[in-house]
């Protein structure tokens, strides 16, 4: 995988990636609908300009095909913390190792270049697939923020918070590398 800084030009490719599985129909995550993608990209880039987010387009290294997007969000430079979030991948790459490789790249950058003390992950309580994926990365559950967010459909979201700390990073990195080296 390759993580490129998000650009307005990525719009059409991101719409196509989100259409692989009609990801915007999932009620427990926030993948922009095709007609909302321009607004979403503009919002991510505005947050990036404010210094609270770094947004990336995820591409396959072998073909350059866009398969999704991810961010460092809730950037807290003073406390050397970031959250990896707003991540989604086309359905065709689920369980392919793409998410693991992407997270290894993000975590490596966070700990090795940004010198983070901790990296957070947050997901909807009902998003079992995401919760299992975060646990497989080696993150530990910190807790649940109950009635944390109002969802677009009016429901309340309980948010599960996970993290990897700087002290845990070497073991997490080694395990992610081992998993990626396994034949698929």
Image (cartoon, rainbow, N blue to C red):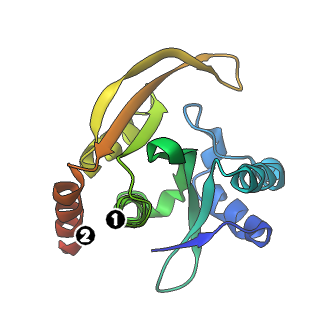
Q: Is residue 96 visible?
A: no
Q: Is residue 91 visible?
A: yes
Q: For residue 176, what is the image quadrant?
A: bottom left
Q: Is residue 68 left or right of residue 47?
A: left
The residue singled out by tag 2 in the image is 180
Quarter of the image that includes the N terminus: bottom left
* Residue at left offset 47%, top offset 86%: 62
Residue 54 percent coordinates (x, y): 61, 57
Q: Is residue 53 above or below residue 63?
A: above
* Residue at left offset 66%, top offset 44%: 24
10 Å crowding of disc 2: few (<14), some (14-19), many (20+):
some
Q: Are marks 1 and 2 in contact (CB under 8 Å)?
A: yes
Q: Nearer the viewer, residue 114 or 60?
A: 114
Q: Is residue 1 left or right of residue 155?
A: left
- Which residue is outermost to the bottom? 62
Q: Is residue 46 left or right of residue 107?
A: right
Residue 86 percent coordinates (x, y): 57, 47
Residue 151 percent coordinates (x, y): 65, 24
Residue 139 percent coordinates (x, y): 28, 43
* Residue at left offset 64%, top offset 47%: 52
The residue singled out by tag 1 in the image is 97
Label 1 residue SS:
loop
């Amino acid at each position: 995988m390759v993580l490129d800084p998000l650009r307005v030009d990525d719009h059409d490719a991101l719409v196509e990636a989100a259409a692989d599985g009609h990801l915007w129909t999932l009620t427990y995550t926030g993948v922009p609908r095709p007609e909302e993608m321009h607004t979403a990209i503009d919002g991510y880039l505005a947050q990036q300009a404010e210094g609270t987010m770094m947004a990336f387009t995820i591409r396959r290294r072998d073909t350059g095909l866009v398969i999704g997007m991810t961010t460092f969000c809730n950037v807290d430079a003073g406390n050397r913390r970031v959250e990896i979030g707003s991540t989604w991948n086309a359905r065709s790459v689920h369980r392919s190792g793409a998410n693991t490789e992407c997270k290894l790249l993000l975590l490596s950058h966070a700990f090795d270049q940004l010198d983070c003390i901790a990296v957070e992950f947050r997901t909807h309580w009902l998003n079992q697939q995401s919760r299992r994926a975060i646990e497989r990365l080696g993150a530990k559950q910190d807790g649940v923020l109950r009635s944390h967010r109002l969802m677009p459909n009016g429901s309340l979201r309980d948010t599960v918070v996970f993290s990897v700390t700087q002290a845990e990073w070497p073991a997490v990195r080694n395990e992610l590398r081992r998993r990626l080296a396994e034949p698929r």
